[in-house]
Image (cartoon, coloured by chain):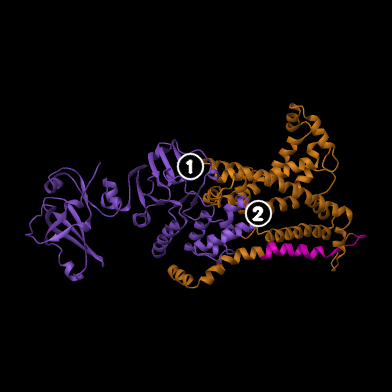
Chain colours: A orange, B purple
């Protein structure tokens, strides 16, 4: 019986493929795209200002609200933060990823990869609260900064409008530090994977042909690792864009997209506006991916 | 390019390269002449590739010095050495076109664009790839990639061109064709070539001189004919072509000396059982134990009376396969000229 089933399956590879693909496709189609679709539909509804009841009729009124200056500011603020976090993570991740991929001995490489990914094993909430303590006014970071007599620099930083605040743990600077830390592994791993696939002989060939190390980096290593940087930036950028925990615990009264969505669908009960605001990051990411494709980031995949 | 011709292109003086306890290259001395096609031949792990990498600058000697036309380059980085390499895996930059790959050496030296285009065209013509400049390496066949790698390495007019088993990945026909072409290109450009290979036939076909490597040392340096006809060690005799190596009692009965010697299978002939021994020849009697018909020739394994085996090959000039197969199990008398043996050192 069992062997007849295997024979039958062997002769009908398309059936096997269907059997294997149906569960994940159902999940993708119904749960994932379905909820996204529900979100899309909701974003075209509106809320009755007087009664607070959702009006289930097609309208672009809700989208128009996104373009209110207050909401536009939220988008700009969040996208700016996401861009800054992405750039800094890329700058931090590249040397480390390069070391792991090209220099570390096999045993050390294993340990470094574990060290990079180990924070991902612990709860993200716990790590955010850990940063809250680290960044607090009487926290270890300001103690450390004061140790070098740099308390004045910190105060000056915190006095800058827009990015400063009463303490690091209640300021965009603090959020930026926490974001950069939390998403760093998502940048290191794709870059390391991309660098791993650059054969050592290409780097040798470049030097052999007369290129100095920096020229080799610019002409050979960076272009070949670029898809990895873009892959990593997709993570860091989109994760920052949608996050609401970090702004909630380390931010001030100025909202980020995730926070706005959280409060619109919760206390304010304005699900249509929350949905419309969620579509914002989706659109931003689609544009981002199209630009990345234009830059050739996916050619080597 | 061709400096004072008495200055060797490359000179190794007591060069060693140790990796931990392993002596990859062990006290190597060698001089490679200007304009020579020089092969480093040996099995994998014999140190030939490490020697090449030290010339290129990818590796640094643990001790000893390497001179390029009289200049000590042992400690120079690759980009400061006037040598270029053709890599085993070609190492073409996948994100660049063929033209950009070939122009790379000129690009990093900031040669003007017009000059670059002109020289790339010349190089592509030399390797018979005119019109391929705008293709990507991934669109080329193995043989074509090989030519691009060659053009890219030659465009800088290096003093010495290093080739690290460049034909290893090609199929037999293409490899034989490229052997001839490489030799022609070398004659045309007049640059010293150092060619690393584990394929003895390749080394014999192309080289002016060959260095045979074994366990980090050079066993013998010489022209292809010297290496083949007069191997100095048992390793060389066995690695380059097929050899019968005879020593001890058996050898003493043949040559009246206990010296180890080698004799090539094609130099041994079957003679009539009653044929007298000439004064310039050696002879033994034995029994044909095995016969392998190989089309162009037949290989016999002969058990010598009193111990030891000899491999003998004979061209099938007149005999048919049925005839040669009947020889199995029969007695035979073998003879060869004294001048064809090589006395072997240890």
Q: Quadrant of residue B289?
A: bottom left
Instruction: Name the residue rendered at 77%, 29% in the picture.
Output: A150
Q: Residues within 10 Å of mark 2 (few under 14, many from 20)?
A: many
Q: Vertically, is A298 above or below B215?
A: below
Residue that badge 2 annotates:
A231
Q: Secondary structure at mark 1?
A: loop
| Nearer to the camera, A226 or B177 | B177
| Tag 2 secondary structure | helix
Give the CA separation, mark 2 to mark 1: 34 Å
> Which residue is more in the foreground, A120 or A181?
A181
Q: Residues within 10 Å of mark 1 (few under 14, many from 20)?
A: some
Spot occupied by residue A186 in the image (x, y as percentages of width and height):
65, 49
Q: Residue B43 vs residue B163: left or right? A: left
The residue lying furthest to the right in this view is A50
Chain to which mark 2 belongs: A
Q: In the image, which is nearer the foreground, mark 2 or mark 1?
A: 1
Q: Main secondary structure of the magenta part?
A: helix
Q: Residue furthest front?
A: B4
- Given residues B81 and A197, the one toward you in this image is B81
Q: Is residue B308 left or right of residue A242?
A: left
Residue named by callout 1:
B59
Please, which chain is the residue tagged with disc 1 on? B
**Span shown in magenta:** A29-51
Task: Tell me how many marks there are.
Answer: 2
Instruction: Residue B248 in the image: state x and y as whole percent.
Output: 16, 44
Q: Mark 2 near mark 1, Cβ–Cβ under 8 Å?
A: no
């Amino acid at each position: 019986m069992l062997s007849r089933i295997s024979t039958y399956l062997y002769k009908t590879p398309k059936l096997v493929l269907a059997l294997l693909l149906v569960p994940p496709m159902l999940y993708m189609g119904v749960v994932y795209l379905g909820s996204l679709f529900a979100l899309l539909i909701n974003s075209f509804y509106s809320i009755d200002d007087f009664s607070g009841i959702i009006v289930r009729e097609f309208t672009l009124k809700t989208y128009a609200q996104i373009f209110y200056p207050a909401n536009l500011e939220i988008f700009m603020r969040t996208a700016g933060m996401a861009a800054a976090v992405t750039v800094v993570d890329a700058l931090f991740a590249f040397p480390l990823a390069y070391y792991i991929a090209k220099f570390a001995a096999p045993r050390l490489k294993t340990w470094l990869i574990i060290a990079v990914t180990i924070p991902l094993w612990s709860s993200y909430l716990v790590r955010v609260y850990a940063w809250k303590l680290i960044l607090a006014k009487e926290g270890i970071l300001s103690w450390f900064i004061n140790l070098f007599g740099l308390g004045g620099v910190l105060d000056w930083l915190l006095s800058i409008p827009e990015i400063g605040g009463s303490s690091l743990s209640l300021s965009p600077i603090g959020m930026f530090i926490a974001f950069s830390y939390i998403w760093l592994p998502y940048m290191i791993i794709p870059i390391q994977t991309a660098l791993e696939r650059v054969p050592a002989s290409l780097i040798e060939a470049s030097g052999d042909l007369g290129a100095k190390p920096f020229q080799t980096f610019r002409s050979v290593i960076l272009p070949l690792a670029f898809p990895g940087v873009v892959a990593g930036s997709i993570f860091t950028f989109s994760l920052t864009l949608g996050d609401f925990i970090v702004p909630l615990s380390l931010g001030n009264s100025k909202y980020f997209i995730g926070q706005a969505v959280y409060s619109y669908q919760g206390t304010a009960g304005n699900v249509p506006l929350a949905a419309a605001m969620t579509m914002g990051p989706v659109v931003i990411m689609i544009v981002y991916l199209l630009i990345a494709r234009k830059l050739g980031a996916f050619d080597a995949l | 390019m061709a400096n004072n011709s008495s200055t060797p292109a490359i000179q190794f003086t007591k060069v060693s390269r140790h990796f931990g306890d392993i002596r990859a290259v062990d006290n190597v001395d060698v001089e490679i002449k200007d304009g020579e096609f020089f092969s480093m031949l040996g099995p994998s792990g014999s140190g030939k590739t490490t020697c090449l990498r030290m010339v290129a600058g990818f590796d640094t000697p643990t001790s000893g010095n390497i001179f390029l036309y009289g200049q000590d380059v042992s400690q120079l980085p690759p980009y400061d050495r006037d040598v270029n390499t053709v890599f085993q895996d070609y190492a073409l930059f996948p994100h660049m076109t063929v033209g950009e790959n070939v122009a790379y050496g000129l690009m990093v030296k900031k040669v003007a664009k017009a000059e670059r285009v002109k020289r790339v065209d010349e190089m592509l013509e030399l390797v018979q790839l005119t019109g391929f400049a705008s293709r990507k390496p991934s669109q080329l066949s193995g043989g074509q990639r090989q030519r691009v790698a060659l053009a890219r390495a030659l465009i800088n007019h290096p003093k010495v061109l290093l080739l690290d088993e460049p034909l290893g990945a090609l199929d037999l026909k293409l490899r034989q064709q490229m052997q001839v072409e490489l030799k022609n290109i070398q004659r045309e450009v007049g640059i010293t070539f150092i060619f690393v290979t584990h394929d003895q036939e390749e080394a014999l076909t192309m080289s002016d001189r060959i260095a045979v490597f074994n366990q980090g040392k050079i066993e013998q340096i010489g022209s292809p004919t010297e290496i083949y006809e007069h191997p100095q060690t048992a390793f060389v005799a066995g690695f380059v072509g097929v050899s019968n190596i005879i020593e001890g009692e058996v050898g003493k009965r043949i040559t009246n000396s206990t010296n180890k010697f080698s004799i090539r299978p094609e130099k041994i002939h079957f003679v009539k059982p009653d044929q007298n021994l000439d004064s310039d020849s050696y002879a033994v009697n034995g029994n044909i134990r095995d016969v392998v018909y190989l089309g162009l020739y037949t290989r016999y394994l002969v058990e010598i009376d009193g111990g030891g085996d000899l491999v003998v090959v004979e061209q099938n000039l007149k005999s048919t396969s049925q005839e040669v197969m009947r020889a199995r199990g029969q007695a035979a008398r073998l003879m060869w000229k004294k001048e064809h043996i090589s006395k072997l050192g240890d």
